[in-house]
């Protein structure tokens, strides 16, 4: 066998090995993405929280974008139109960035916490939809510059709003930030490879897909942390509500007890006796003073009237209550019904 033949076989074997590795890495990527999409879709149906649906949209369009980039979608769906993959890639990338921006806003609660940053995410979302629409009418050469500028705007913006949210006290933002690290590293590696600074091998060529797979897994942890924090907040709210209900019930019991005590107080009983026996206002005042054990002089001093006036009203009280002495008045107050 000649040297040229041996070299050709070696190159063929090497190419097959590289191809098999590439296929393995892409398989790992798509496997992770599909599992995470199904998992978060189930969470959406269970929790009815739209953040999970937005995340599923992000994952699905990432899968479709990667399929188009690698020419896999064209092999299965439009084998006679290989150039269509390039157009579809831009279309799916735009939709992926749309869902990513809305997921970022919803996950970080930007609408409630930072309205200006939420507006920034809406700007990116609308520009992403514009990219998607333009990709259907413009050539790849015409749309590529706009797509690149949108990528340069969106990815740093996602990281920026997450940093601001974390500094403002939203702890779950740290998981979001950590999740972006492997994907950004993948982008850096591919950029360095494109500049000729790194060698060509399947690991480097698959760096974005591998970083994307890790990002999806880490974001799922972030969403799990979101569930944990929401459950903690719900428990706190339930505890506060239970404490509030307990206080209300306690106040109601105290109010009922206070009403019962007031009904049995000397003042309340004298008021009832006065109504029952048609005592005048002055007679009622004197009856209260008698119930407190005061003599005529002290009653006169207390009410700023003469002692004769006290004696006059006392006689009327005796007559109306049908008693002859003060001790009988006390019994009347205690036992009259």
Image (spheres, helix red, strand yellow):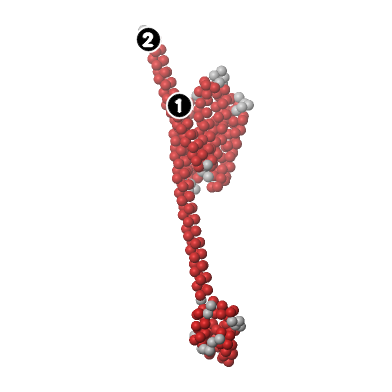
Residue 38 % position (x, y)? 48, 34
Say which of 86 and 302 sits in front. 302
Whether residue 291 is visible to the viewer of this picture, yes or no, is no
First along the sequence among labels 2 and 1: 2
Q: Is residue 123 left or right of residue 226?
A: right
Say which of 103 and 304 sits in front. 304
Q: From this viewpoint, which residue is outermost toward the bottom?
A: 308
Residue 103 % position (x, y)? 53, 39
Q: Residue at x 40, y 18 (%)?
A: 14
Q: Residue at x 55, y 23 (%)?
A: 85
Q: Say which element carries label 1.
A: helix
Which quarter shows the N terminus?
top left
Q: Are marks 2 and 1 in contact (CB under 8 Å)?
A: no
Task: Give the residue at mark 1.
Answer: 26
Residue 236 % position (x, y)? 46, 52
Q: From this viewpoint, which residue is outermost toward the top?
A: 1
Q: Nearer the viewer, mark 2 or mark 1?
A: 1
Q: Say which element carries label 2.
A: helix
Q: Residue at x 49, y 62 (%)?
A: 249
Whether residue 257 is visible to the viewer of this picture, yes or no, is yes
Task: Give the residue at mark 2.
Answer: 3
Mark 2 Cα-neighbour bin, 10 Å: few <14, some 14–19, many ≥20: few
Q: Is residue 232 left or right of residue 322?
A: left
Q: How many marks?
A: 2
Q: Residue at x 46, y 54 (%)?
A: 239
Q: CA distance from mark 2 to mark 1?
A: 34 Å
Say which of 282 and 216 sits in front. 282
């Amino acid at each position: 066998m000649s040297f040229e033949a041996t070299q050709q076989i070696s190159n063929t074997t090497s190419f097959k090995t590289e191809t098999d590795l590439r296929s393995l890495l892409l398989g790992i990527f798509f496997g992770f993405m599909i599992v995470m999409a199904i998992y978060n879709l189930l969470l959406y149906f269970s929790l009815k929280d739209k953040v999970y649906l937005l995340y599923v949209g992000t994952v699905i369009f990432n899968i479709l974008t990667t399929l188009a980039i690698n020419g896999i979608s064209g092999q299965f769906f439009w084998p006679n139109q290989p150039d269509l993959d390039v157009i579809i890639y831009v279309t799916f990338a735009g939709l992926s960035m749309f869902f990513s921006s809305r997921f970022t806003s919803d996950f970080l609660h930007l609408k409630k916490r930072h309205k200006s940053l939420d507006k920034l995410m809406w700007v990116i979302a609308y520009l992403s939809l514009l990219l998607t629409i333009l990709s259907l009418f413009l050539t790849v050469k015409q749309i590529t510059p706009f797509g690149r500028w949108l990528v340069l705007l969106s990815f740093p913006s996602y990281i920026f709003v997450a940093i601001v949210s974390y500094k403002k006290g939203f702890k779950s933002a740290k998981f979001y930030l950590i999740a972006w690290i492997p994907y950004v590293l993948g982008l850096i590696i591919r950029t360095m490879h494109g500049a000729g600074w790194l060698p060509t091998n399947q690991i480097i060529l698959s760096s974005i897909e591998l970083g994307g797979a890790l990002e999806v897994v880490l974001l799922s942890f972030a969403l799990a942390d979101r569930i944990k924090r929401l459950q903690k907040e719900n428990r706190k709210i339930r505890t506060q509500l239970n404490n509030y209900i307990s206080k209300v019930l306690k106040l109601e019991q105290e109010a009922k007890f206070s009403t019962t005590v007031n009904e049995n107080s000397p003042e309340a009983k004298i008021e009832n006796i006065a109504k029952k026996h048609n005592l005048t206002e002055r007679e009622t005042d004197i009856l209260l003073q008698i119930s407190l054990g005061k003599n005529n002089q002290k009653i006169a001093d207390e009410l700023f009237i003469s002692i004769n006036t006290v004696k006059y009203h006392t006689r009327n009280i005796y007559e109306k209550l049908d008693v002859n002495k003060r001790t009988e008045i006390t019994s009347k107050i205690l036992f009259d019904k």
